[in-house]
Image: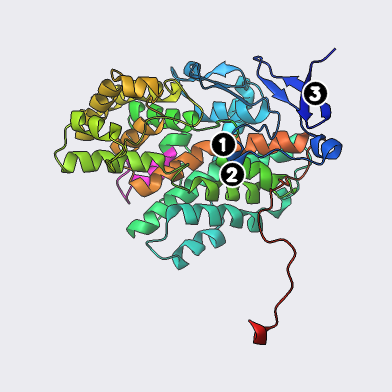
Amino acid sequence: MSEKAVLTFRDKKIELPVLVGTDGEVAIDITKLRDQTGMITFDPGLGNTGACSSSITYIDGDKGILRYRGIPIEQFTNHPNFVEVAWLLIFGRLPKRDELKAFSEQLTENELLHEGLKHQFQHLPVDAPPMAILSATLSNLACYHQGFLALEDTEALTAAAARLISKVRTIAAFSYRRSRGWPIIYPDPKMRYCANFLHMMFSIPFQQYIVTPEVEDALNLIFILHADHEQNCSTSTVRTVGSAKANLFASCAAGVSALWGPLHGGANVEVIQMLERIHAGGLSPESCIEAAKDKANPFRLSGFGHRVYKNYDPRAKILHECCDRVFSSLNRQDPLLDIARKLEELALQDSYFIDRKLYPNVDFYSGILLRAMGLPTNMFTVCFAIGRLPGWIAQWKEQHDDPSTRITRPRQVYTGNDAIDYVPMEQR
């Protein structure tokens, strides 16, 4: 017999079902609460509300655990392959050799943009934000691929996913080159996913950008570590839009718009800007740590703490180690990396940060790595979106495959005027 939770309010007691997740997480099912009591729950930010059940990503923030389809995130680091992880997230299992080969070939076949869509870039201001371009262009893909607005089977979903995952990097690279006034560089069908993206970003006519294995692995890791992260703001947005039976293109475009917010996708930009201010101002890491602990001081230490993780973000650990490999291969030093490492060392020894469980998060090192690859800060969130796209597709698919899915329609606690009379203009 399943457990029940008992809600007591005034003279009434209501029994509510209890759900238990795979790793023992307990949830009280309030689906029928309003029908039975006339009451709703109040949870601004939905930090304590489970809006769905999902088998895609598992997080234990207290222990610093992140798993994709049950596989610990650390196990993707030795030979990082973003395309393989994308398949895993969307279809629920690791692909077989022939499946991965076929999916990779689909990505290659769909890497070009329709020329009509490409010409739209010429009508955009050169200083247009890349995230605005990405959101608009993903939505515009629906105009050129209308056959995929209704996905009735796995084959159609696979084809639509291949188009989105492949074309998103082409759109991103084109938007960057538009902002620089550079000629468009088309994708190279002989190159792998991440190397091809960097080729489109940085190659120039008659001089191809050479991608080192260390940099290619690092970009694969960045995409993998951002590929899904449970019901965050942008993923919840994709599910909210998708709950209305909106098509995959529109739902993912909405996810890009949510990710654009500085509190979500723009956090690593704030880290870089903070490190640049520290370096330019000649500030010591020790003084920054003290300033961060002073409530009267406006200085804020970006890249520490997380809404979910109350331990060291496992993604940050991976990128910390990746920094060593990349900078060694490039034979380059970065004063911002030196500052970041010292800040981390000091914070992890300071009781103020330890007691408040303020550990480095993924944004603390991802921006430094992207900067080392030559990407400007306005492309950081675009790279986040490229990485997160398979997770959005997986979440959209899971929701659409669930026959119990209902359109998202939160309630509210109304605090406005009670009934009042309309006042004619001449009496106001």
**How far separated are the C-alphas under marks 3 and 1?**
25 Å
The stretch drawn in magenta includes residue 285? no
The residue where tag 3 is placed is 17
Q: Secondary structure at mark 3?
A: strand
Which residues fall within the magenta stretch? Answer: 196-209
Q: Residues within 10 Å of mark 3 (few under 14, many from 20)?
A: some
Q: Residue at x 74, y 35 (%)?
A: 154
Q: Residue at x 60, y 46 (%)?
A: 252
Residue 382 located left or right of residue 372: right
Residue 274, above or below 343: below
Image colouring: rainbow
Q: Nearer the viewer, residue 26 or 191?
A: 26
Residue 301's spot in the image, x, y percent? 31, 35
Q: Residue at x 70, y 39 (%)?
A: 157
Residue 414 located left or right of residue 61: right
Mark 3: amino acid: Pro
- The earlier-in-sequence mark between 3 and 1 is 3
